[in-house]
Each structure stands twice: as structure tokens, then as C-alpha cells.
Amino acid sequence: MTVRPTKIPGIPKPPASAGPELRRYLESLSEAIEIRLGRKGDPRDRAVTLRELIESGLARELRATPFDPNNLSAGNLGFVSDDVVDVTSTPPQPTGFAAAGAYSVINLTWDFPLYTGPNHSHTEIYSYPSDNLASAIAQGVIGVITGRAYVDPVGSNITRYYWIRHVNEHGTFGPWNSGSGTVATTAPDVTHLLGVLSSSITSSELASSLSTPIGQIPGMQVTLNGNSNLISGLTGNVNTLTQNQANFATTAQLGGYVTTTTLTSNYYTLNQVDQAITAEINNFNSNTLSANYTTTADLQTNYYTKTDANNAFASTSDILNAQVANPDGSSNQVSLSQAATVQASTNGDLKGQYTVKIDTNGAVAGFGLASTSTAAGNITSEFIVNADRFAIMRGGSDTTAAVVPFAVVPASTVDGVAIPAGVYMDTAFIRNAAITAAQIGSVNADKISAGTINAGRIGTNSIDASKLNIDGSSITSTVVNGVPTLQLGSVNVNQLTGNSISANIMSGTTVYANRLTGDVNKLLPFRSTTAVSFKGNNASGGGTVQIIAVQLPATTHLTVGHKPFGSITGWYDSTANKTYSFKLYMQLGSGTYQLVGETRFKANTNLYAQFAVSGSLATATTSTVNMKLEVTRTGSSGIYDSDTSATIDRVHEVSGFILGAR
């Protein structure tokens, strides 16, 4: 089958050498053909071709098996059922259309349309930044695609809506896949966003504070007996304070901020705290503490019970708070809380927790460390950060710019750049990962395993696959005689070249070849020099004698077969006034023999005579064909005359061939 109609040549005039009767016959035949071709007479009387029926939608092309109108069978009708392809003058609505955004391109895929009447030509694609089909048409066609995939290189962080429709060979447009556009968005440019984020994070006040050396921070943190207190504007040399100087600080050293009386009235010395803890654990009723600090009753009521004594517990908590009252009565407040707790139980349970939180009008940010160990040996450690924006910043000083290799950020706009919420990493090394959907600019991998790969183009040196399915046509591999062999359902090519083509069926309008071998044309030559004796047809021991028998094997052209043809020549002794008949027979399989050729000769004298006989069957066959040659000698009156002579004649040599031809 060909895409273009077969060109019908013109009909020449009868040759000048033709006689009057033959000329009239040829002229009548020419006129009849031209009427059926529509070249003469009323066009309504011309013949309709199968191609015209198929293209009109009244017939359907059977693509799996080449159609042969001269050899109709149940599997070769030239038509298919309604559930194979659609016959329509208008292309059908596209199905299976999908748009998927990658890193900088959008991949479009759809089901390949199977319809005829007329056949499919191409698919048109339209797009627009918003869901507006009318504007998309005004914008113009993006692609005219003959396949079922398209890659639109729109760039990073771009959203597009798409529509497609099919067009047949007559230029008729089918309906759109949908009135609503199919939307897809490409991934943002992570390199650019990381640069914007890095600049934003490293320039923040917190980042600057974390990058500033400790010696340059105004104010100083002073720890007195485990209690942390911030003393702003502290004067004097605090580093010279010792635990033995006026219970940790003298009035002169603290200046006008803290007095010795305040320390002794409101705080414990290190020795006093040790004494209180030791006395309370040993004996709850012991009153070893000074009355100026606490009493036994205070400890029993506010600090310890006998059950609590089984546990060792230590904690500290600091809170800084600043607020300002507004004229309307409301207030803005920010608080910082630092808490540390450790607990050891006699049953082996250990707990420790450290948290830092900042609360600004209900918006909380902070981090915490926790570790828990049980007597059973189960240990759980945690580090949790609660923040809208979290980043790891590396480096940074007066002379070096800081970088951000990792950041977790909310959706925001920085310097006019829209940044989607997510986790951003500059460089990552991942051993195992499970990703539901990925948008990747490029992939350099040793191996990619996937259930489905949709791509507008695959460029590679090698594709290793068990099966390729292209628009419903499959390419599979099998092993024939130990050799991997490619199997194709149907191939339609402009040119096919190769060292070897092996096929069960090869058909075409014209086949050009320097040599055809194999079962395309099966030729079996033969020759025999064994003498075969025979007598008269009615002589004692005489009658018809078989000279030779040969067999043409069954063809491998199982759907078409071939037509057998045979030809035999030879020489023999002849007797004067005898008639000789040589008959050629063919048999299909185990059927009856059919006479396909005969030659007769009457000898007027004794001589060596020659014979030649040939013949063929009118129909093609796929079975074996048996061919035999017989000779009969009759009297001088012809093949029906009786010959009772016992004189012996001999066929001395026969040669010939049997041919199976397409």
C-alpha cells in the first residue's frame, strides 16, 4: 500500500501492424477503459476505487495486513470493524492531553489520534499566560506537530495554559481538547533565588549580630553563683571579682548599682546553698540555715517533700521583657525566655532540656535541645527550631561576605523577586531519596529507572529496551536460531536498505532487486539419464509409463503462496508409424493430479526424437506440489489408436525444473 495514488498511464493507440479485426477490438476496449476512468462520457459512470471509498469514510483500511483485492479471504477484506479506528470527515477531539512543567520547559503529551476519512495530518498547539483561548488564538500557533509530544522552552518560573486540536489531510480542524486551558508551571531559577536569599539573610540584623565578634558587643553577661543577670553600663574591672571579695562583690567595685546588703539579703552564697541542699536531703527537720535566709518550715512548704528528695532536680530560667503602652490602651511587647532543666531519678530516668524563645506580640520563634534516657536504655535526643525563616550561614566578617548553603523560607518577595516557600540548598549530596514530583534542569546519571518516561526527544548513543511502542505500533525483540531478532508489526518507509531482510511476507507494487533467492521464487532444477523403457499402450506389459516425478516444497508465504510452473525436455528412441504422447501432471498436497501440459509426436521412421512439455497451475498454493511426467505410445492413427506391439522404446534423458513464483 502506498500513501499516494497509483499513477494510471495513458492508453496508446492500437499498433499499425494490427489487422482490421484486432484494431476494432482494441479501440472498443480502450474506449470502455477510458469511460470507467472518467476520461470519456458522463463522469457519473466512472468506476470508484477502494482508495476513494477509504478516504470518503465508506470503507476502512486494514493496516495490519496489506490488502490484496485479487486474493480475498476472511482475513483479507480491506475493511476493519468500528472499534479499531474512527472514520470521520472531521478529526476527533484530542484525548489524554497533559502538560507538565520541568525546570525551564513544559512537556506536552497526548494520545495519538487514530482516524481516517481523510487521514490525520498534524496537531496544532496554542498557549497563553492566562486561561483565555480567544487570546491564545490571537497570539498564534506555537507548534504544528505530527507526533504526540511537544517541548515548549518557556524559561524558568513561567506559567502557561495550553489547548490542542487535530487537523486532517484536507485541512479540516477538529474540536479543541477543552474550552479550559491545561496549565503548567516551570520551576523557579534556584541559582538566582539562592543569590537573592543569601543577600537577604546575610544582611539581616541577626546575621550581622552573629557575625560580630563577642568582644565588640555592648554590655556584659555576669554569672553570680549560677544566677545570670545582665548589668548594663557596668564600670570597673569585673574580671578582678573573686568569690572571696565581699561575698562576690564590694560596694566600691559595683559602684552605685548593687550593694553588699542587697546581695546578703536577697541571694545565697555558694557555701550557704551547699549547706541548705545537704541539710535538707539528710534531715528535713534540720535547721542549719541562717534565719536571715530561710527556715526549715519554708523548705518543707515551698521546696522539698520527702518524695521529692528521691530526685535530684536543677533548673534555671531567665526572662527579659520590654513593652511600650500605646495611647489607645494596648501595648506592644517582646519577651525573651531562656530556661534550662536537668533531672536525675533514682530509678535511672534522666532528663535534660534547654530552650530559648522570643515572643513578639504572640509571634514565637525559638529553638530547643532535649535529651531523655530511661532505665531500659532508650535514649531520645531532639533539636527543634521554630521560625518562619531558618538558615545556615557560613563565614562573614568585615572583609568577607557570608554565604547561605541551606535555608527554609516562607513565600515572600525580595527586591521585586517572588520567592516560593520551600527548602533551598546550594549543594546537596543525597544517597537515597523519594520524590513525588521533580523539576530538574539537567540530569547526569549512571542509571535512570522509571515506569514511564515522556519526552519530546531522547538523544543517546544507545537505548536498551525489551519493547518499543510507537503510536500503537510495537517493536519487539525475539531470538531466532540463537540470534536476537527485531520484530515489527508493519513498516512503511521511503527507502529500506540493509545487508539482509528476512520476512515471512513481502508485498509491494514493484520490487527491484539484483537477485531474489529463497522462497520468493522457488526454483528446483533436475536431470536424469536413467533409461526408461516402454511398449505399446495395449501390448502385454505395456501401457502408460511414468518417466520422472519431482516435488516443490510448501511455501512459507502462508497468506499468499505461489503458483507452480514446470518445464521438462528430453530425447528418446522412436519406432516408425507410432504416436507418442508426453503428459505433465501436478498435484496439490494429497489431492488429485491435474493435467497441466501435453505434447504429441508421430514418427514416420525409426529415429531419435526430442520432446518438450511445460505447464502450471492457475491458482497460488501454500502446500507442497508434486509433478510427474508420463509417456504413452499408440498406433499410427493417433493417441486413441491401439498399439499392441511389444517393441521397446526408451527415454534416455530428461531435464527441467519446477518453479514456485509469486
Image: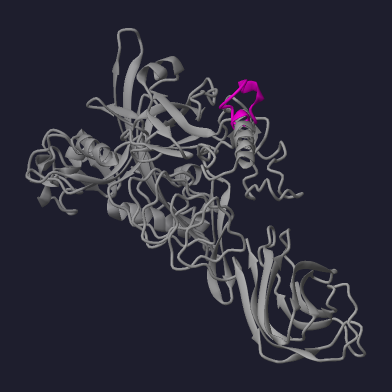
Residue at the image point whose x is 77% and y is 49% from the top: 74
Specify whether residue 321 is painted magenta: no
Q: How was the colour assigned to the protein in this rendering?
A: one colour
Q: Give, as a single range, the part of the protein colored magenta.
A: 34-47
551 to the left or right of 256? right
In-front residue for pair 171/457: 171
In-front residue for pair 75/73: 73
Residue at the image point whose x is 52% and y is 67% from the top: 516
Specify whether residue 39 is painted magenta: yes
263 to the left or right of 52? left
272 to the left or right of 540? left
Query: Quick check: can you spot residue 446?
Result: yes
Rendered view: 577 above or below 123: below
Percent x, y of residue 93: 58, 27
Screen quadrant of the C terminus: bottom right
Percent x, y of residue 519: 61, 69
Rendered view: 195 above or below 296: above
